[in-house]
Image (tube, helix red, strand yellow):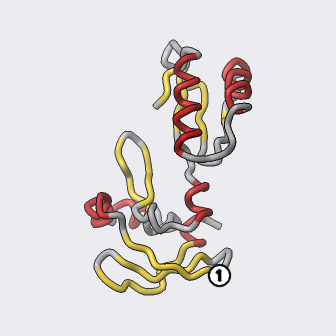
């Protein structure tokens, strides 16, 4: 199953509002495209090219994909975020990346040790935790995007 299979648009109620269903929980919810993302939502190229993706995802630039209904999205979506940061070593080579659940994906043992030391001070996913991890990685000499 893909994320697009979990969030179903049942009815479009206006240009930027929708009645939706979170299939995995059966929870119905209303979603409104965030006002600062309506111009992104208007471009359907990504959705047309990625039919299994959630219909509310759009490219944000710099290789990032984001949710256009972040304010109204179900909790599972907020934690699903595929990649929240890329980590590069001092020589500019990618050393790993971190997902929305704060999981590090890397085969670099030094980065893994550094990360494990940092996350002992983190309570869980959230913007404050992400910013803290990013700042600590930068202090440790990594480049983070």
Vertical placement of residue 69 versus 101, above or below? below
Picture mark count: 1
Tell me if 121 is positioned left or right of 96 in this view.
Answer: right
Q: Provide residue 67's location: percent of width, then percent of height.
A: 44, 59
Q: Residue at x 70, y 18 (%)?
A: 110
Q: Residue at x 26, y 61 (%)?
A: 39
Q: Provide residue 138's location: percent of width, then percent of height.
A: 52, 21
Vertical placement of residue 13 versus 51, above or below? below
In this view of the protein, which residue sits in the foreground, 113 or 139?
Answer: 139
Residue annotated with mark 1: 26
Q: Residue at x 28, y 78 (%)?
A: 15
In this view of the protein, which residue sits in the foreground, 98 or 70?
Answer: 70
Vertical placement of residue 57 versus 125, above or below? below
Vertical placement of residue 111 versus 58, above or below? above
Q: Provide residue 17's location: percent of width, then percent of height.
A: 36, 78
Q: Residue at x 59, y 25 (%)?
A: 95
Q: Where, by quadrant of the figure, is residue 16 drawn?
A: bottom left
Secondary structure under badge 1? Answer: loop
Tell me if 93 is positioned left or right of 69 in this view.
Answer: right
Quadrant position of the N terminus in the picture: bottom right
Q: Where, by quadrant of the figure, is residue 96 drawn?
A: top right
In this view of the protein, which residue sits in the foreground, 135 or 68?
Answer: 135
Specify few, some or many for label 1: CA neighbours under 10 Å numbering under 14, 14-19, or 20 or more.
few
Q: Where, by quadrant of the figure, is residue 111 drawn?
A: top right
Tell me if 85 is positioned left or right of 39 in this view.
Answer: right
Q: Provide residue 70's location: percent of width, then percent of height.
A: 45, 61
């Amino acid at each position: 199953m893909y994320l697009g299979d979990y969030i179903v648009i049942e009815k479009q109620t206006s240009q930027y509002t929708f009645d939706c269903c979170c299939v995995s929980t059966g929870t119905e919810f209303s979603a409104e495209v965030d006002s600062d993302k309506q111009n992104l939502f208007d471009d359907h190229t990504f959705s047309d090219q990625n039919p299994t993706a959630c219909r509310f995802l759009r490219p944000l630039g710099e290789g990032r994909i984001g949710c256009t209904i972040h304010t109204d999205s179900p909790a599972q979506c907020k934690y699903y975020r595929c990649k929240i940061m890329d980590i590069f070593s001092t020589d500019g080579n990618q050393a790993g990346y971190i997902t929305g659940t704060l999981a590090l994906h890397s085969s670099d043992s030094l980065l893994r040790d550094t990360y494990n030391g940092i996350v002992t001070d983190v309570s869980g996913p959230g913007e404050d935790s992400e910013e803290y991890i990013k700042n600590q990685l930068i202090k440790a000499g990594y480049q983070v995007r």
